[in-house]
Amino acid sequence: MKKEIILALMLIVAAPAVRAQKIAVKTNLLEWAALGTINAGAEYAFTDHWSLEADIAWNPWTFSRQRSAKCWGVQAEGRYWLCQKFYGHYFGAHAQYGNYDCGLWKYRYDGYLYGLGISYGYALPIARRWRLDFNLGVGYNRMGYDKDAREYRTGDVEMFGREHRNYWGITRAGINLVFIIK
């Protein structure tokens, strides 16, 4: 109960500091296009050049007994805007965590990932409060998962055990539709 009271007081104290063009909401169109991943994000600008962005994504789809793309993930990024917030070029540093249970072919993977990376992006104005935000990030992900093979006709499962993998490469990609809240 004490935590809720402290949080409410902090929000009341911080509320007058929220001013025009400091908050944006967004959705990543690429994630919607890739197997219909439901996603949303928000960004808060601290100054004219610095902002903090956070995204969540969830994919609940099961296509058949052997094929699914269930996953969820969260990602946060600090951004430095070269010109001004929510406009033009920016550089960022991001962190992410996710959990998945997916398999579209012979093998299924059930596990987690976490990682860090850097990114570059560009926010293109398309209307007074609307932007298209293009971004690409590279970095490192650590994955741990259980791997199994499922026989399509019989439903038999062959377990391969716990595996770990280090991944270096693209860790973030997006074409975001952004709305700036006034």
Image (cartoon, grey):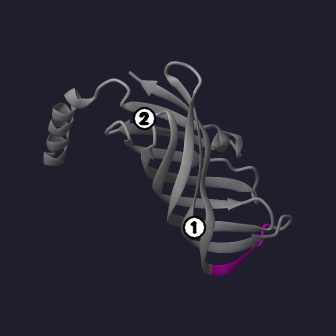
Residue 136 image offset from top left, x and y in percent: 60, 51
- Disc 1 marks which residue? 111
Q: Is residue 178 above or below residue 129?
A: below
Residue for point 80% across, 63% down? 105
Name the mark on residue 84. 2
Residue 140 image offset from top left, x and y in percent: 55, 68
Location of residue 11 by image quarter: top left
Label 2 amino acid?
A: Gln
- Which residue is more in the foreground, 60 or 65? 60
Query: Which numbered disc, 2 or 1, marks the residue that appears first in the sequence?
Result: 2
Residue for point 66% across, 67% down? 109
- Which residue is more in the foreground, 137 or 89? 89
- Which residues are drawn in magenta? 155-161
- Which residue is more in the foreground, 84 or 132? 84
The answer to whether 152 appears left or right of 37 in the picture is: right
The answer to whether 31 appears left or right of 179 in the picture is: right
